[in-house]
Amino acid sequence: MTGMLEVSVWRGSGEEGAYESYQVPARENQTVLDVVSWIQQSVDPSLTYRYACRVGMCGSCAMMVNGQPRWTCRTHVKRVLERGGLRVGPLRNLPVIKDLAADMDPFFDKWVKAGGVHPPSRTRYQPIQPVRPDDPGRVEANKAIECINCSVCYAACDTVTGNPDYLGPAALQRAWTLFNDAKVQDRQAILDGVSGAGGCHNCHSQGSCTRFCPNELDPLSAIAGLKRASARSFLKQRRQEC
Amino acid sequence: MLKPHRHHPLWLAYMLHRLSGLALALFLPVHFHVLSMAITRPESLDHFLSLAANPMVKLMEFGLVFLLAVHFFGGLRLLVLEFLPWSPGQKSLAAASVAGAFLISGTFLLRAV
């Protein structure tokens, strides 16, 4: 690939801003993050964006690329180019700090609210609890532990857009992992924390989280699992009361 | 136009389910009103039913059955998705077998009619 790419990048602070156009040299192998870095290093050093590892481990470089949320360090320009151009913006559903850097606080606050802190069942003075890798709960919990907190699912979700209190796919998937973790003692507390207002039952199963997760995780199924578990727990409580 | 992050089948299925539900909700009061004519104004009902031979009405009936079918299957899809912890492959097989069953029984019904 030779020639120039037409790249429009969101510039501005807070809610104010507009897309500005840049001409970026096209390369044979080039990621969206490379393009953004080139603009910052060669045209405008004041361009603000966020990245760390550049290899899809840290989850800090997610942005909207041509209207879709993506991890920019592992998104090849060739795969997403539309009519020779790119449109790069900050992640949806999060406040913008400046340019391409979104404020991740709401995302992480919800992660913690849904059970980001592991509540252990034993102290360090007790023997380690053995967990068999093929235990069904462990198999289910394993499915989501590769989440890198990039917030791509959160940006893809229209339910988050419509309801700012909704915990969102990543946080709920985390709760599902804890719910299936044999080392978590009070699993009902996990369930209670995510089945009220803003919890798993707000999900409309649009599936954008699973569609866009860069690590190919499946928050949609995790949230469905929480819905099932909380429905079962509700029915069980009713039966005990009768 | 449809925003790019919505360009995938599950989102479209979600929207189709919502829109078909809304359209059916709008249709139902009209439907009940027409049915009530059987008691209140039988002649008006007969006149109305004679319109059903019109090709345009046939097309609208097709639309109505389509909305019903789409909403019905959309609901089944959600129930399967949310209440049966199956793997995606198993879900596709289950959906295919239900679709196949409806195709066969639907064809049978059409022949009978």
Image (cartoon, coloured by chain):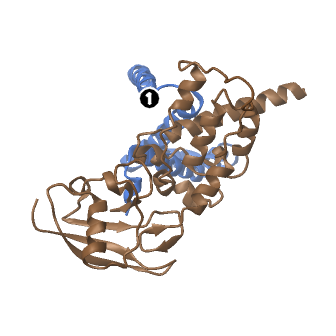
Chain colours: A brown, B blue
Q: Return the x and y of residue B67 as percentages of the image width and height.
A: 48, 43
Question: In screen coordinates, is B12 left or right of A240?
Answer: left
Judge whether B58 appears above or below B82 on screen: below
Name the amino acid type tagged 1. Pro
Q: Return the x and y of residue A13 as percentages of the image width and height.
A: 48, 79
Question: In screen coordinates, is A203 left or right of A217?
Answer: right
Query: Which residue is pictured at 20% across the width and 55% down the height?
Result: A78
On-image quarter of the C terminus of chain A: top right
Query: Which residue is pictured at 53% across the width and 44% down the height?
Result: A205
Report the front residue among A194 and A150: A150
Q: Please rate how many residues cluster around mark 1, counting C-alpha atoms within 10 Å: few if below 14, some from 14 to 19, many from 20.
A: few
Chain under disc 1: B
Quarter where residue A192 is shown: top right
Quarter where residue A182 is shown: top right
All told, the count of numbered labels is 1
Query: Which residue is pictured at 52% across the width and 40% down the height?
Result: A220
